[in-house]
Image: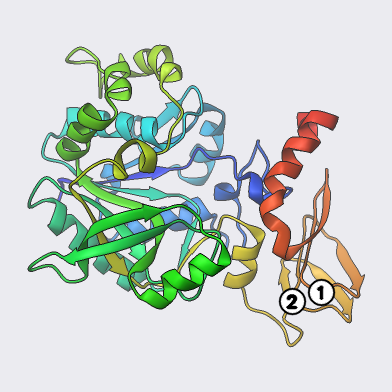
Amino acid sequence: MNNNRYCVVMCGGVGTRFWPFSRQGRPKQFLDFFGTGRSLLQMTVDRILPVVNPDNIILVTNREYYDIIREQLPEVKESNILLEPARRNTAPCVCWAAKHIYAMNPDAAIVTLPSDHIVLKEDAFRKAIEEGFEFVEQGNRLLTLGIKPSGPNTGYGYIQQGEMEKDFSEIFKVKAFVEKPNIEMAEMFVNSGEFFWNAGIFLWTAHSILEAFDKYAPEIAQTLSAPDGVYASSKEPQFIDQKFPNCVNISIDYAIMEKAHNVYVKTVEFGWSDLGTWKALFQSSPRNSDGNVTQNTKVITTDCEDSIFAAEGNKIIVAAGLKNYIVADTEKALLIYPLNEEQKIRNIVNDVKSRFGEEFI
């Protein structure tokens, strides 16, 4: 196994679109949605272990999730858990992790993974990651994985491929990043064969991504610039506590990927789903003869179709006449909402917080 290869798992998100199951105190990446005994975070780490040495797996999370991380991944070294003192989106997270790794190994190559994705074809996933490492290790390149779309989807951003890179299978120069489209545009993208879903999975060397921050997001690079000997030392946590909250709140896509000229996409197909919403869970789960999904609960339905039912604890759900609905019951909240309008759940969470306080989120 190549000891210059590292994995950064970003696991500090709140997951508001999965409310009420995903709550601020225990977001979706820490939940076992499929009754396997493994959370989404644990499954993410399991998936990368055949590719990256366990000692080279770095977790970046919010400080309030430290105890959950230790509970779920006790095998991860203490020094490999980077605790953000504030939420600042993915760009500061990536920059910090790269500086931390570079201080330990200037020759490092890094794969950066979200902690809440599903991958059904794990062998194909690992093959893609290994090929991605080989590509970025040979030059100053920033690589993202583009998922071959199974159909038009308005919930994902898209990547348009350009010219194919010589000597590398299914790797193209990126022509454009496109925000989440309406359904008409999504259909055009899929029919063209040039557009792929943006999975938020990235590969680069530590040197390449830090050089990109210096060039395209200098305010972040400067904020997190430290004297020699700070990163990967006992001085690092105190330095981050002081500096990290001053970083701009911005995604790695906006800060770097949409600006840089050395960005490539590897087109892949490995049974991927961004488990970001109830609809994504619905689409990734087995359904009964009525098209309904039941998540770890007892259900009796009459005339219900294409709906998802989930409950915490030892409960039974009895429903009639629901078509394309979410029914999610927890100790603090019950959500009954049209499945096709799930993108509004984030706004609902904000409304609940403003009207009733954080107790229910």
Q: Which mark is residue 215?
A: none
Task: Work out whether 70 lies above or below 42.
Answer: above
Residue that numbered label 2 is attached to: 306
Q: Which amino acid, mark 2?
A: Asp
Q: Quadrant of residue 240?
A: top left
* Relative height, residue 76 to residue 160 (above, below): above
Q: Quadrant of residue 130?
A: bottom left
Residue at image point 11% right, 39% down: 107
Residue 210 at what x, y percent from top left? 21, 32
Q: State the CA–CA distance, disc 2 to disc 1.
A: 6 Å
The residue under label 1 is: 323
Q: Secondary structure at mark 1?
A: loop
Name the N-terminal-most of marks 2 and 1. 2
Mark 2 lies on a secondary structure that is: loop
Q: Nearer the viewer, residue 174 or 299?
A: 174
Q: Position of residue 1 (x, y in %)?
A: 16, 56
Q: Is residue 296 above or below residue 62?
A: below
